[in-house]
Image (spheres, rainbow, N blue to C red):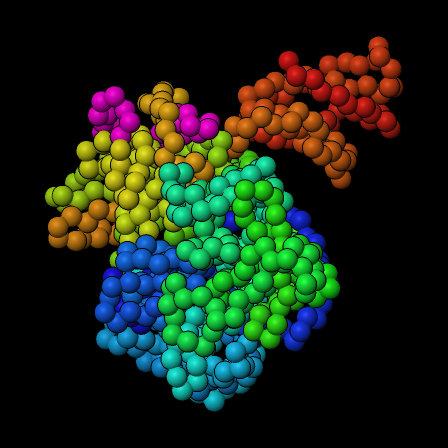
Amino acid sequence: MKSSYCSAGLAWRATLLVMCLPFLSARAQISPGPYEVLPFEDGFIIEAFFDLIYDVGGNNRADWTGYSGTTWISPNAYNNHRGTDIAVQTGTPLYAAVAGTVTEVVTHFPKNDHSTPYGNFVRIAVDAPTPNGESIDLLYLHMLTVTATNGQRVSIGDQVGLSDNTGNSTSEHLHIQSEIRGGSPVCPFYWGHFKFPIMFNATANHQIGRVVRVTANSTVIRTDHLDSSTQISTAHEGQLFFSSYPKRGYYRVFIPNNGSNRSGWIRADQVEEVFIGTVIQAMPDNVTYVHSGQLQTKYSIRSTPNDGASQLGQVLFGGGRFVADQITNGYYRIPLPGASATWGWVKPNNRMIVYPELIHPAINTATLPTHDFPIQESFSELGKSMFGRPKFTRSVVKSFTPSSPGGDGKALFVTDANNSGNGYAESVLVGKPGHRNYFVQCDVYFNYNPAYLGSGRWERYGIFLRDDGFAGMTDTFEGGGHCYAIVWDNDDGRLRAGYITNATVVDLQSSSRYEPASGWRTMRIEARTNQIRFLLDGELLAQVNNTIYPAGQTGMGYRWHAGNTPTFPAARGAYFDNFLADTLDPVPFRFKQFGLEQDGKMRFLLSGALGSTSLIERASILAPTNWVSFTNIVNSNSIVEFHDDGTNSPCQFYRAKKL
């Protein structure tokens, strides 16, 4: 467990739709804070937010997202946590998120030294004030080295050091602390210290904050991320909401006009991520935080953009973010969840932030990964793999013998051995929180070698789908596993196919199955609505109707079980190859793309239902009798590529039909 000073977290990109709304002045609303970027080169899971209640007695906690409770599960705050924690691999470059002056540097502690709370750290006195008017310092804790020097001026993007696990830390990560100069730490999200509501790092592979648009006719907003959770209200098609993070097939979104809930949960397969709208945020009152405490002066949500219009509801709490799709007469139109599709108008004042831009202007949304299907990787380049998002550290591609079926002698090696702290699991996560009907398939090497493990110790690894976004497998540290999975244990060869809840595997096979031999095996899981199928080398292991996980991401995972006396063999880890995930939804049958290559070949992309066969015909003259058969195409993925390199005709026509 981490201390009050630190902590030990999908990245999933949005649809490529951009719309700019005009920024209008309205009664001297305030500008957002000065932090422009997430300050790391590569980041993974959000592990903990700031504890707003800051309960020294240890009885409760709350954070900016609307969470309030007594159990810490990432990314929620835990008691007395004074910053925001993000998993980053030891040695990750860290950059100044803001312009300022370095006023404190500690950099003499060795790697993984835990003798002090902060370990190596840097403090930057920020030039610009907060939206609340305070002077602030920005601190990075648990560093490996600090390269900035005391008194140095830094600009946004200047490197200040490298990350690590020093100080009171149980897993390598970056602790970002926003501190009132000469006073106490405060939550940078709750108090609007970031310049943009959707924050990226400079390499745009990590994101905090999202805008989601409802795609279903209507969808339930619940108190928790379970289909059985109590309904708060209803959201409707086209409404925009701000989400603090996704988890377990849901997005956590801020909602107005509800005295009991600052936020709620919307199913991820009922919305889509977009980069549209204007985000507004009511500043909290300058009082001690109470989770049920409402703003002293609330914001009316009116029926029309006029001061005399009737009131439909109110913005009751500070710190939450809402997304406007229209701006008129100094008013911003936001959704008002309820029985019918309703929007209302809010007029900002000098205690409300209006964000002029959603994201940093240097981020090009058109170049962000879409994370759409098909997702396929054969791991052909040696070295650190940037495929997917790990939980704690990047996996590496290594040469491996024997090769996987049809492989090239290289495979992805997934291990917890690179984690400097208590993270005994590792994963590679791909896809979107809203992915529901799809399959995942991967070759996995079963390394049946129990002699090196020791008594009571084993390795477990396999594939999963509809994960909660934290890919814990059978580990509860920084978020327990919640997913459907096939996992294999290398101490006795036990193979399990089922679902994982709070790190416990429920095997759905009719009897226990063992595979006590080494070799490459092909794991596959299919999810169609509530029908889940598990297969090994094409053999059906189990087929069930199960509703526990409605949607989520997919990937590969590894877990080291250290036994009563923890030992850590250096060779631990698992090899994966030929990863494939693709949709099981009906796919429109059409040519997606075509073009002439430099070598004279015609290149085509053809979409179609998985497993369907298409007849491709061509003609040099567009006439009913001129069509001749060219080739048959089987859709091994939802989109397949083929070429025509055998024609010199200056004009060629192509058509396809399903067989």
- Looking at the image, which is closer to me, 53 or 612? 53
Image-quadrant location for residue 447: top left
Q: Is residue 110 visible?
A: no
- Looking at the image, which is closer to me, 348 or 270? 348
Residue at 54% in and 46% down? 338
Query: In the rendering, at what x and y percent does residue 371 appear?
Result: 55, 44
Query: In the rendering, at what x and y percent does residue 88 appear?
Result: 41, 61
Query: In the rendering, at what x and y percent does residue 317 appear?
Result: 48, 64
Q: Is residue 89 above or below residue 383?
A: below
Quarter the C terminus occupies:
top right
Q: Is residue 130 above or below residue 343?
A: below
Image-quadrant location for residue 423: bottom left
Q: Is residue 588 above or below residue 323?
A: above
- Looking at the image, which is closer to me, 610 or 28? 28
Q: How many marks?
A: 0
Q: Is residue 121 left or right of residue 211?
A: left
Residue at 22% in and 46% down? 561
Q: Residue furthest bottom?
A: 151
Quarter the N terminus occupies:
bottom left
* Magenta stretch: includes residue 517: yes
* Magenta stretch: includes residue 655: no
Q: Is residue 249 visible?
A: yes
- Looking at the image, which is closer to me, 336 or 380? 336
Q: Residue furthest top?
A: 625
Q: Is residue 593 above or below residue 207?
A: above
Residue at 37% in and 25% down? 545
Query: In the rendering, at what x and y percent does residue 274 appear?
Result: 61, 50
Q: Which residues are magenta?
A: 507-533
Residue at 56% in and 39% down? 218
